[in-house]
Structure formats: structure tokens, C-alpha cells
Amino acid sequence: MKRIVILASGSGSNAENIIVHFKENPQVEVVAVLTNKSSAKVLERCDRLQVPAFYFNRPAFTASDAVVRLLKGLGADLIVLAGFLWKIPQNIIDAYPNQIINIHPALLPKYGGKGMYGEKVHQAVKEQGETETGITIHYVNEHYDEGAIIFQAKTAVEPSDNPDSIAQKVHQLEYEHFPKEIEKLLL
């Protein structure tokens, strides 16, 4: 049995999609969701889906091995960032080499880096007049959005699109591809 731990900071729609995708899979289990926001909506989703969830603060994440110990205790085979906004500290990267992946709402290397997430990405795509955007699933390293690319999918950006409609297109790509790519990595 392969064990996934998801890290999320927000509403958790991608986390829920991954949990539901693997719910009936006898080979893969989402064993927990970890969040850095005690008010994150992902906690409500975890409660409804009956998946254990844990909150941690910045010192537990960046100034100790508490999160590494928690991940080890959960037996994580793969750590999946699904809307998680903090940079992963070196001690976690060292403990899980090539076992941490992220999804980014753009075609990296464009529109990546510190501060480029969610609506900020879609606004930048629109402002720059891009004709396409998409998603990038990549390994996590010590730099924001610079790990090796695992998978990309594209969607057209029409002149009539606004940041919200771009976000909807990107979310559809996330929901379609993220669980499948996780499955490919684990099985």
C-alpha cells in the first residue's frame, strides 16, 4: 500500500479530488492532510471525507523536525502539495528526495516563483496577453517552482477570457490530470 500525505493551505478542492480518486484504490491511500492554516477550508473537507488532518505553525515547519517526524510517523511514500503556499524547508526535502510534488497553475517556467500563485498567476497570464496557459506538475526542490517537470497540460486563453474564466479552465486541468499523474508515480 502506497501512502500519500497532502499539504494544503486553502479550500482544498484539489485535495478532495485526490482523496476521492484514491478512495476505492486498494494500492494507494491518502493517509492525512496537513495544513498551515487553522482556518483552511480543507479541514472541513477532511472532516466530511473522514481523512485525518493536522495543523502546524511556522516554527514547527521551519525551525524543527516536528513535521518530518509527523510525515515519517504517517509512513508517507509521496507528499503532494495541493495549494500549499509555504516554501518547503531543506530538512523535509532532504528527508523525502524526489518524493514531494507540486501542481502549479501555469506552464512553468513562466509565471512561477515566490508570490506567484492562484489568481496572481491568472491575472499575469491575462495581462501579458498569453494565448495559452495550463498546469505544471513538478518535483519540489529548494527553490519555488524550479523542480524537474513531471507533466504539463495546456488550455487556450481566448481574448474574451478574464482571470476567473482562466482559473476555471486551469482548475479543470488540475482535476483531470493531478490524480492520474500521482497514480503513475506510485504504481
Image (cartoon, grey):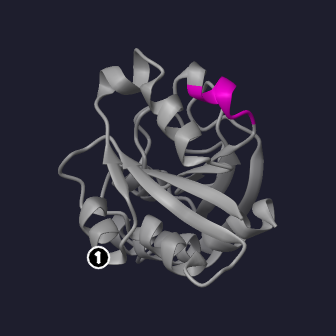
Q: Is residue 157 visible?
A: no
Q: Is residue 169 visible?
A: yes
- Who is closer to the viewer here, 11 or 121? 11
Magenta region, main secondary structure: helix
Position of the C terminus by quadrant: bottom right
Apparent side of residue 120 relative to residue 81 in the rendered image (left or right): left
Q: As drawn, which residue projects farthest toward the left?
A: 39
Q: Quadrant of residue 144?
A: top right
Can you say whether 116 is above or below 91 in the image?
below
Apparent side of residue 35 relative to residue 177 in the rendered image (left or right): left
Can you say whether 47 is above or below 95 in the image?
below
Report the residue at 42% width, 57% height from top: 122
Which percent across, then down, holds residue 56? 31, 36
- Who is closer to the viewer here, 88 or 1? 1
Residue at numbered disc 1: 48
Q: Amino acid at mark 1?
A: Arg
Can you say whether 61 is above or below 174 in the image?
above
> Label 1: few (<14), some or many (≥20) within 10 Å?
few
Q: Quadrant of residue 57?
A: top left
Report the residue at 41% width, 34% height from top: 86
Report the residue at 39% width, 70% height from top: 13
Q: Is residue 157 magenta?
A: no
The number of numbered discs placed on residues in the rendered structure image is: 1
Report the residue at 40% width, 41% height from top: 85
Quick one: SS at disc 1?
Answer: helix
The part of the chain drawn in magenta is: 92-97
Position of the N terminus by quadrant: bottom right
Q: As drawn, which residue projects farthest toward the top?
A: 63
